[in-house]
Amino acid sequence: MILNLSRREALKSAGGLILGVAFPISPEFLHYGPESDASTDWLGPYVRIDPQGVITLRVPASEMGQGVHTALPMILAEELDIPLDGVRVEMAPNSKAYGHPSQLGSQQVTVGSGSLRGWWAPMALAGATARAMLVGAAAKRWGVTPEECQTAGGAVISGSNRATYGELAVEAAAMPVGKATPKSRGDWRLIGTEPERVDVPSKIDGSAVFGVDVMAGAPAGTVLSATVLHSPIFGASLVSVDDAEARKLPGVLDVLTFKAKGRTQDFIAIVADTFWHARVAAASVVAKWEGGRPDLDDAAISKAIHAGLDAKAHYKKKEGDAAGAIAGAGTLVEAVYEVPYLHHATMEPLCATARVTADRVEIWAPSQSQTLTEGAVADALGVPKASVRLHTTLLGGGLGRKSEVDFVVEAARIAEHYDKPVKVIWTREEDFTHGYYRPAFAAKMRAGVSRVGDTAPGTVTGLSVRLSGPNILTRFVSDVIGNLIRGSFVGENFHENPYHIPDQRLEYHQVELPIPTGFWRSVSASHNGYFRECFLDEIAHAAGVDPVKFRLDLLVHSPRHRAVVERAAAMARWDAAKAEGRHLGIAVVESFGSIVAQVAEVRVVPGAASTAASTAGSTGGSLHVDKVWIAFDCGRCIHPGIIRAQAEGSMGMGLSAAFGEVMSFSGGAAITPNFYAYPVLTLAQMPAVEVEVLEGAPDEPGGVGEPALPPIAPAVCNAIFAATGARIRKLPIALSGLGV
C-alpha cells in the first residue's frame, strides 16, 4: 500500500474525504489526490465527499453520447448504497492520475468502447474503499465493530445510531485505508437497472456545454473567432497566399499562415470577430499549393487496393493446410469484396478554443484523447507539458475522429498570436475533405466445400483470406514487431476466427496511399465483419445448408457466439420466414469484448436495373430494411437501456454506411464536400429495431458503443441475396443500383 501522507493531511485540514485508486499491478495500491504524479501508477477515478454530504466523482472518460457519465457513476453509487442522483459528475482534468487501464496508465483516452471495460473495476474498488472508510469512522465513533454497521441512503447505521456520509467525511479521511471488497453480483441493487441518464436534462434545456458552446456568452471582442484552410491535395505544401480581398471584408482581423508542425500540416487561419465573418473571408483567400499526388483518384485507389490482393504479403498467419484442403474439396467458392473510404461525419464540427499566456496554455475542446492532445500542444508551442491544461467539453459525436489532435493543436498555434482566447471552428467542407478516414479495403476469399451428391449437405474444408488496404497503425508502430501488430490489427475477425475451420490461412498486403486514415467506429471489424459474414453465407449456399444452421455447426467451440446466433434467429422467427415470404439475413461479429448477432428483414421492390446494377449483379429496384433484430452479449451489464440505445445507434450508423456513404477522390483531393454528397441515414430509412441484452458468463463488461455496427452490412446484404439471388460484394449498396 502506498500513501501520500503529506497530501492526505492537507486534504484533511480542508475537510472531507477524497479518494483515488491506483493499480500498478494489483488493486491493493491506493493513492490520494488527483494531482498525484506517481509515474509507476495509473490511478482510477477519484471520489470526494465533503462535509455537506456532496459526493463528487471525477470521471476520466469523455462523454460523447455513449452514456459513460451515467454508467460509471452508477458503479460508484452502487458501492456507496446511494441513488444515482446522489453523485455529482465532474469531468476529470488531463492528468497522469486518469490514465486508462488498457493504456498502462500512460494515456487518458476514450476509444475502443473501453470506458466501462477499463474503469468498472477501479470504480467499484474506489466506492468499496470509500464505504469501508466511512463505516470504519462510524464504528470508531460509536464504539462498535464495522460488522455491526450497514450503509443505506448516504448514511451509516448501527442500531439507533445514524450518521450521514457528510458528517463522517472528515473522520473517514483519517481512517487507515485497507483492502476493500466490492459487492458481488447478487448484492447489486442499482447495477442492471435503468435510471435516467444524468446528461440528458442539460442537453434538453440547452445548458450542456459542447465544444462549439465554449465562451458563447462572452462579451463582444473578448473572444476571437477563426476558421482554417488546408491544401486540397493530400501532402501538398503551402507556397503563397493572396489575402488582399479577405482583409477588406467586415470583421476580419488577420490572415495567418502556418507551416507543418506538431501533428499539423500547412494551414491558413482567418481570424475575425465572428465565425461567420471568418467563414465568408475564407472564401476570398487565394492560396497556391505544390506537391502531393495530383494523379490520385477513385480509379487509382481501387487499382492499388486490388493489385495488393496478388502482391507480396506483409503479414501471414496460418492454421493447418488451407491450400491443400481447398484443392482437395469438391467445390471451390471464391469472391472478391470491397469497401470504400468513409468519413466520420460527426454532427458537431471540429472545434477548439485556446488561450495562451506567458506561463499557461488553456484549451477547451471536445477531445477523446487528453494525454495525446496535451503533449502535441506542448510540442507545437515549445512549452512544458505541465503548463498545458485541457478542459474537456461534451462531444457532439466523436466516432474516433476526435481522438486526433490536429484541430486542437491548430487552435493553440493560432491563439499564440493573441492575448485573447481564440475559438476555431472548421467548416464542414474542411472537415469532410481533411479527415482521418476509415481506409478502403478489399478481400479475396477462397473456400473449399465438400459435398456428397446434390442433395446431401456439405462442409467447409478450408478457408483462405487475402486482405489489401492501408493500415491505420502505420502512424504509430513500425519495424518487424510493428508489422506483426499491424497485421493482427487489420486481420481482426479473421485473425481470431470463431468458426471451427481447422485449415485456415490469412494474408495481408499493406497499401501505401497518401490519404490520412484513422480510427472509424468499430475500426477493422467494420469491414472484416462484412467480408467474413457475407462470404460465409456464400459458402453455406454452396454447401446447401441453411445459413443459421451452418454457423451453429461451425461455432462448436464458441458457446457465446452460438448463444447470440440462436437468440437473434429466434427473435426473428427465422425458421418460419421462408414460408411467410419474408427475406432474412444473419451475421455475427465479435469486437471490443462483446458479441453481437443481427438478423435483418428486407424487401426489394423490383425496378429498372442500372448499369451499375448489372455490373454488381443486382436486379435494381428499391431496398427497404423493415426490421433488425439484435442479440447483444456484452458480459457484465451495467445499464441495459444504454446498451440498447448504443446498439440501435451504432447499427444505424453501420446501415447508413452500407446504404450510400462513400468518400470520393479526384486530382489528389477528397471531392465529397458535405452532407449533401454524403447521404446519412434518414428517419424514414431507419428500420424497426428489437434488442435483447444477454448477460454472458464473463464477469467483466464488454464494449457497447461499437460492436453493433459490424454485423448490419452483412446481415442486410445476405438478406438481399435471399430476396433477389444477387450478391452485394461492393459497398455501398447504392452502387449496385438498388435505391435506398
Image (cartoon, rainbow, N blue to C red):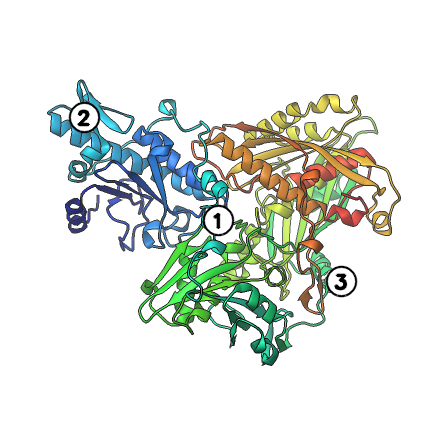
In the rendered image of this protein, does residue 139 appear above or below residue 99? above
* Local crowd size for mark 3, using a 10 Å CA cut-off: few (<14), some (14–19), many (≥20): few
Q: Residue furthest left?
A: 143
Q: Residue flagged by tag 2: what amino acid is it? A: Pro
Horizontal side of 620 relative to 106 (left or right) equals right
User: Depth-wise, is mark 1 or mark 3 nearer the camera?
Assistant: 1
Q: Residue under circle 1?
A: 111
How far across and down, in percent of the image, does residue 48 sit? Answer: 27, 42
Q: Are marks 3 and 2 in contact (CB under 8 Å)?
A: no
In the rendered image of this protein, does residue 284 appear above or below residue 493? below
For the point 32% across and 51% down, the residue is 97
Give 235 or 49, whichever is nearer the viewer: 49
Q: Residue under circle 2?
A: 146
Determine if residue 733 is in view. Answer: yes
Q: Residue flagged by tag 3: what amino acid is it? A: Ala
* Local crowd size for mark 2, using a 10 Å CA cut-off: few (<14), some (14–19), many (≥20): some
Q: Residue furthest right?
A: 608
Tell me the quadrant of the picture where the N terminus can be found: top left
Give 366 or 371, whichever is nearer the viewer: 366
Q: CA distance from mark 1 to mark 2?
A: 40 Å
Q: Residue under circle 3?
A: 299
Q: Which mark is residue 667?
A: none
